[in-house]
Image (cartoon, grey):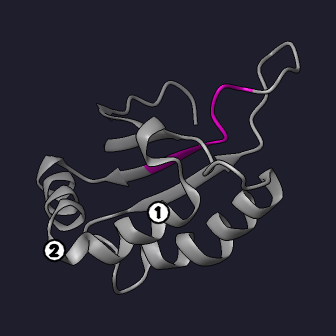
Amino acid sequence: MVKIVALIKRKPGMSREEFSHYWATVHGPLAVGPAGPPAVQRYTHTDWLLQPDGTPAPFDGVAEMWFDDRPGLQACLDHFLGEAGTPLRDDMAQFVDMDSVIMFVGEERVVKS
């Protein structure tokens, strides 16, 4: 499987609780609903991150989207970056510090499931 991983920080002035609630109840459903990109096989988000020593992580969350293949990934990217992705991008700007997002694409290799 191919996936997108995004490391995100909450918008300045937003509490962790507000960030988590918005992500789970507003953005998440939008991302997988009719306005969301096609070909997504799985979407998860992880928030309230800590480093192994218990200190806060430098990011507030990790989003992951899985695709069966590279054409599915490309369909998602075309949607997200095009006009059809405007509602999703605008919504992200409501709770994400867009200048701090780190996003990468990788091919997942399952070692143990």
- Percent across and percent down for residue 32 are 44, 74
Residue sitting at 20 percent across and 56 percent down?
77
Magenta segment, which residues? 57-64
Nearer to me, 67 or 80: 80
Nearer to me, 64 or 95: 95
Residue topped by disc 1: 92
The mark nearer the N terminus, 2 or 1, is: 2
Using residue 84 as the reference point, say whether residue 106 is left or right of it: right
Task: Place residue 35 in its image quadrant.
Answer: bottom left
Q: Amino acid at mark 2?
A: Glu
- Percent across and percent down for residue 39 are 26, 66
Q: How many marks?
A: 2
Kindly identify which numbered label has been placed on residue 83.
Answer: 2
Q: Amino acid at mark 1?
A: Met
- Percent across and percent down for residue 85 are 26, 71
Tell me: residue 30, above or below residue 14: below
Residue sitting at 54 percent across and 78 percent down?
29
Using residue 79 as the reference point, say whether residue 52 is left or right of it: right
